Amino acid sequence: MKLLKSLYINNFFFYALLGVVGLFVLAFIFPALYNATWYVLLMLLTFLVLDVLILFFTKNGIEGSRMMPEKLSNGDENEIRVGIKNYYTFPISVKIIDEIPFQFQVRNFEIKQKIKASSEKEIQYYLRPTERGEYYFGNLNLYVSSPLFLISRRFQFDKERMVPTYPSYIQLRKYSLMAFSNNLFQYGIKKIRRIGHTMEFEQIKEYNQGDDIRTLNWKATAKKNALMVNQFQDEKSQSVYMIIDKGRVMKMPFNGLSLLDYAINATLVLSNVILKKQDKAGMLTFSKKVENRVFAERRASQMHKILETLYNIKTDFFESDFSRLYTDIKKNINQRSLIVLYTNFETMDGLHRQLPYLKGIAKNHLLVVVFFQNTELNELISKKAENIQEVYDKVIAEKFSFEKRLIVNELKKYGIYSVLTQPENLTLDTINKYLEIKARGIL
């Protein structure tokens, strides 16, 4: 019974059997073929029995294992490896059917490989999750065929296993070095121009070629009888709060991920950069109420706390209450801080409804509003209109795109910084804005 459960007849056997049936049909026309056809059928059945024996004679013909990270990175390509050891003394063909989580909605997952006799092989495939949460993998099914290729023997390994999907920690590793340098052109970002100095004095040192002559310390120069300059360093321990809007404006999907998940991924990476720059990183989320609060601190466990908080963010995409956010910030964030607000505005009317609260926050803090370009509108604008309906669509799309630029100017009028970005560039643009603010010393 156990043998029957793991035995599968390949299509090749049915094709061969169909050929035998064809020979029997021909035997009615050419009787001389009749006896030869029976010999062919007998030979086919003999090979079938032989194939069963050589595949099932060895108790453990192969060994398989699925190797994956402890957690998946949301929105990124995650490598899954399948290792196979062949204990058979002949080359085999293997069909891999991995029972991947239902969230991927992959119905026809199949990988075919050939493995040499008494050898091992590793196969890779990639999965890109688009939502946080728990992902359950089922059995790893390996269907093994001999060179006869008449039947397959099924082996099952790695029973059900759960893997959580966290915000994009792959991006976190990718951009962690950006914290140590403002020289960002190698990442495709504009190079930051330093303007002035931050207020934290470090030391007086001898002038070296390339030092800014505006920092010459004339008193120290007179005492030492050599050119001396003041050296400054970036101010440390400044508080930076990332605020994520969980309202309905963040539900819009882009390349499989919602704007909310893009903001969550960017928050994780930016938090790492902030802590490496010796500043204090904190966060909170809001929609109908303010929650998921992590107070700005600079301790070893802060990144883990932020990561777990981001993983557990849940929302029903209600209408966002900016008045509640303003009240909460005024009550709980007393020190002047950099506030990075991830939200989205599609029209000037939408901005004007929330503008009084944004101006209230900007009175006591340095506020940066991060919102998104609608890339689908850009495609519609660049497309040539073929009829009247497409002309109307194009005009409306241009109007919405123009309003996005008006929103940037409107915020600037009230001293509110803004980042208008495409979703795929969100992480880079927010890091760049933070480092620009640090370089200019305006916090």
Image (spheres, rainbow, N blue to C red):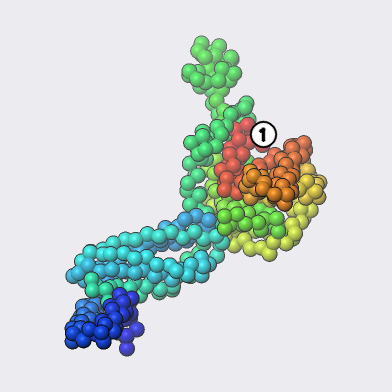
Which residue is at the front of the view, 244 or 376?
Answer: 376
Viewer-closest of 256 and 289: 256
Residue appearing at x 45%, y 69% in the figure: 108
Residue toward you, 251 or 314: 251
Q: Residue at x 45, y 57 (%)?
A: 78
Q: Quadrant of the N terminus?
A: bottom left
Residue 140 appears at what percent x and percent y? 38, 71
Farthest-out residue, bottom: 1
Query: Relative to 204, is 97 on the left or the right?
Result: left
Give the x, y percent position of residue 127: 46, 60
Please state which amino acid type lies under the numbered disc 1.
Ile
Q: Secondary structure at mark 1?
A: loop
Location of the C terminus by quadrant is top right
In percent of width and height, residue 297 lies at 60, 48
Give the residue at x 21% y 86%.
31
Q: Percent x, y for residue 131?
A: 56, 61
The answer, for residue 270, to whether it is visible in the render is no
Q: Which residue is rendered at x = 70% and y = 55% of the image?
A: 249
Q: Residues within 10 Å of mark 1 (few under 14, many from 20)?
A: some
Splitting the image into 4 quarters, where does residue 288 fall?
bottom right
Closer-to-camera residue (247/442) = 247
Is 163 left, or right, of 371 in this rendering?
Answer: left
Q: Which residue is mark 1?
A: 442
280 lies above or below 74: above
Does residue 291 sit above or below 423 in this rendering?
below
* Residue 414 visible, this angle: yes
